[in-house]
Image (cartoon, rainbow, N blue to C red):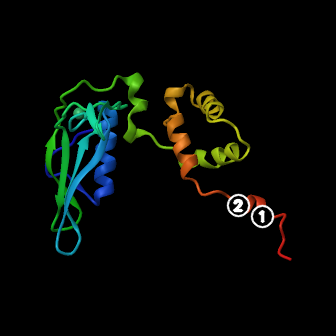
């Protein structure tokens, strides 16, 4: 998988997905950073960065109290990035690419923890909804998925993602309303 200056993408999603897939192979996670819009609201350029870009705020103030902040993903002021700019003939081209990272990549056994590569896939959602409606705990659900995929690290998402998915889900009232016919 190679990335180079001038490489063309049809849209910003394609650029993000390509850089994310590239990051997955190399062992890092990415996030969307800044972008700039033109007069008509179109995105003129957009930048994607390594998730370890920036500096960790190790301490911050809450009122008069200085507290230590704990972060799952600490930052290393990494400068690795991909920037694309609007192509006059349509789509986007790579206008800046910094491949060097200021930190070691995640080891293969830790790569499933990288945020931008985790997602609860469409194919598992119905089963999760059923489990959730039956009050099956997320830990037990994860064990089922782990045995299906051959390990917790092969599921593609973590119990945090599972809980986030359930928290954001719109409650399914349709399941319960069938017994209540309009009078
Ligand atoms: Zn990095």
Residue beneath the point at 77% across and 64% down:
177
**Residue 39 falls left or right of residue 183:** left
Residue 104 place in picture, x, y as percent:
25, 24
Question: For mark 2, does the 10 Å Cα neighbourhood hold few (<14), some (14 to 19), or many (20 or more) residues?
Answer: few
The residue beneath circle 2 is 173
* Total marks in image: 2
Quarter of the rendering occupied by the C terminus? bottom right
Please identify the residue farthest to the front as the structure is shown.
Answer: 64
Considering only vertical position in the picture, is 70 above or below 93? above
Residue beneath the point at 55% across and 41% down:
163
Residue 38 place in picture, x, y as percent:
17, 69
Q: Classify the position of ligand 1 by quadrant: top left, top right, bottom left or bottom right.
A: top left
The residue beneath circle 1 is 177
Residue 132 is drawn in which quadrant? Answer: top right
Residue 9 place in picture, x, y as percent:
25, 56
Are the residues tagged 1 and 2 within 8 Å (C-beta)? yes
């Amino acid at each position: 998988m190679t990335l180079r200056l001038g490489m063309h993408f049809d849209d910003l999603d394609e650029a993000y997905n390509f850089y994310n897939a590239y990051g997955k192979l190399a062992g890092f996670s990415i996030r969307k950073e800044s972008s700039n819009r033109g007069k008509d609201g179109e995105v003129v350029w957009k930048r994607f960065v390594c998730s370890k870009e920036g500096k960790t705020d190790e301490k911050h103030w809450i009122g008069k109290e200085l507290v230590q902040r704990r972060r799952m993903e600490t930052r290393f002021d990494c400068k690795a990035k991909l920037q694309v700019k609007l192509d006059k003939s349509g789509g986007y081209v790579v206008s800046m690419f910094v491949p060097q990272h200021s930190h070691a990549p995640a080891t293969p056994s830790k790569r499933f923890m990288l945020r931008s590569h985790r997602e609860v896939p469409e194919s598992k959602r119905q089963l999760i909804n059923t489990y959730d409606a039956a009050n099956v705990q997320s830990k037990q659900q994860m064990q089922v998925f782990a045995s299906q995929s051959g390990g917790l690290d092969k599921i593609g998402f973590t119990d945090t993602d599972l809980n986030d998915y359930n928290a954001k889900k719109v409650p399914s009232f349709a399941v319960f309303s069938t017994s209540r016919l309009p009078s």
